[in-house]
Image (cartoon, grey):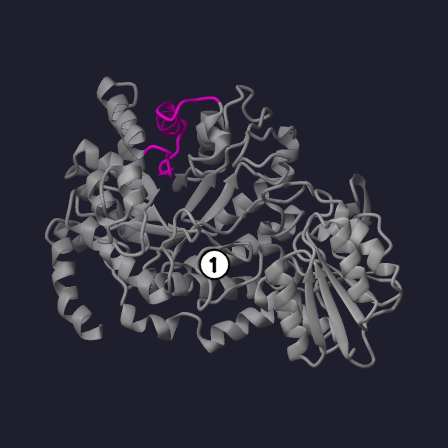
Amino acid sequence: MTNRLARTRPRRIHALAVPLAGLLAVAGLGATASGSTPAAPAVTATDAAAQRALHGMTLEEKVGQLFVTWVNGKSADEVNPKNQADFGVDTAAQVIRKYHLGGVIYFNNDTRDNFDDPTQVAKLSNGLQQAAITSGAHIPLQIGTDQEGGTVTRMGAPATEFPNSMAIAAGRSTDAATQAATIIGHELRAVGINQDFAPDSDVNSNPANPVIGVRSFAGQPGLASQFVTAEVKGYQDSGLPFETVSSTAKHFPGHGDAATDSHTGLPRIDRSEADWRKIDVPPFKAAIAAGIDSIMSAHIQFPSLDPSGEPATLSKPIITGKLRDELGYHGVVITDSLEMQGVRELHSDAEIPVLALKAGVDQLLMPVHLDVAVSSVINAVKSGDLPMQRIDESVLRVLKLKLKRGILTSPFDNPALVAKKVGTPAHLATAQGIADRSITAIANDAGVLPFKEKPAAALVTGWGVASTQTLADRLTAHGTKATALQTGQTPSDAAIAQAAAAAAKTDLVVVLTNNIGGFPLQTKLLQALMATGKPVVAVAAQIPYDAGYANPVPTWLATYGYITPSLEALAKVVLGETAPSGKLPVDVPAGADVNTVKYPFGHGLSW
């Protein structure tokens, strides 16, 4: 593989260099660290380079630069029936060529799966870049994914997996956040991914938020802002442009107070403009001050900012008025996925991309029907409904970003080096250390922890087939023989009885909960386990708010997620090998009574 890459790579770069020779000659960005402050001539060179590329593009090529879509398959030239159904062509490479795309986004779910192993991803990225630079305007792609850490992780093991943002903030180390973002960014870039749609910059001020939760760093703007700044630094400023990734602050103007999931509906944020400035704005201001490459819009109604009822993605008062004019942000704005119901409730799929561009957005992420979306923008320009100047503004922002991040000068990765850069022992050790610092002891009223001697046997029960088994395995590895018996989020009476019977025969019960507020039958399980008289340790395995709900369990820990490093850290705390050191990044209310704080921001026990 190394020899083949060495033979073909010069020809690939030549294919790019011919149409963009003038652009690359004046760019001069390849050896400048992305975090450095450029001198005035460098800024002028970047502008000139982008202008030269823009002037050689057709309308169709310009419009293509504004779209970012998924592709189906794990190689660029793999024939995949889903590509035919979605785009009318057979391969991912043909999708790039057909639409002159500016970017793609990778997924790892049952419907769209681009990930097998890191080396395969690197080859996929190279194949897509080859398609981009040998067709149309010959402009390399932004290749992005959602690698926030924890719940939202697209590239899993053997890549390094980090805890959720709230877990990192619980450790209170901004250096750890920078380390995590640095490693994530370098591993992504090693496989050809040059844009990470992270960090989540929302302030999770609503404990019942169904879509943000532990993806947010904190429930208070000051702490969230510190960690957003730290992660932007890690993603963007931790190496040369071709070693780092663009980061994306999301979801502007702030999704933290939502009570509806914008994937399935259109949330309405009834917060005053004054409170918006106080709560939601600071992390985005921090991201802008840190030099964030892009900002993602939210599909939310925010009447105090725009009384028209338009979702923020389509709102000129919000995108242009607030984000650009008031906050002074002049970089790339990308929509959240245009597949989401939140943006599709009020307008047709043909209207949405045109309205978004009129609002001031630059990039259109994942329209449901790409043909319809692209055609609607082209037709709007031809009819005069959308000025060419508006298109040119956005294309220039995209091109400048590609120059800044070294995408135009270094579009390819080297698959032969992936194993040396991804999931290294040093990276894995860093992730484990961050997870170790995140475990938060919320309550220990009965003094169950720490154990003077390790229990001989334990039962791990509650939510999650994988999470209960993984924790049981980790406890066993640390000397306590543990058995897993998952009961799910809505345990039946039979499952509860089975768990209680198993608990009566063991020395320790660890029960994992996940969103008791939404799935209250978990409280019934806790009551049955406590009735056995055995020591019970309840663990909020996702949102820490579970500890606030009325129940008889006096011992609560929070992990803020259930990736293996978090469960390894939990096992060590439960068995007394380490002491908890995490502090709550949010207020935990007394169950559904959000006006009564049971465990305040900053609370966290140790021993």
In the displayed structure, would residue 346 be above or below residue 529? above
Query: Is 287 part of what is drawn in magenta?
Result: no
Q: Quadrant of residue 436?
A: bottom right
* Viewer-nearest residue: 353 or 265: 265
Q: Please give the residue where the numbered disc 1 appears in the rendered image.
A: 233
328 horizontally vs 533: left or right = left
Looking at the image, residue 124 lies above or below residue 569: above
Q: Position of residue 187 (x, y in %)?
A: 40, 65
The three-letter code of the residue at mark 1 reads Lys
Q: Which residues are magenta?
A: 346-369
x, y percentage for residue 189?
36, 61
237 on left or right of 517: left
The secondary element bearing badge 1 is classed as: helix
On the question of residue 408 being in view, the answer is: no
Q: Is residue 346 left or right of residue 102?
A: right
Between residue 547 and residue 216, name the one nearer to us: 547
Where is residue 96? Give x, y as percent: 24, 45
* Residue 182 horizontal side relative to residue 9, left or right: right
Give the camera-side residue of 205 and 344.
344
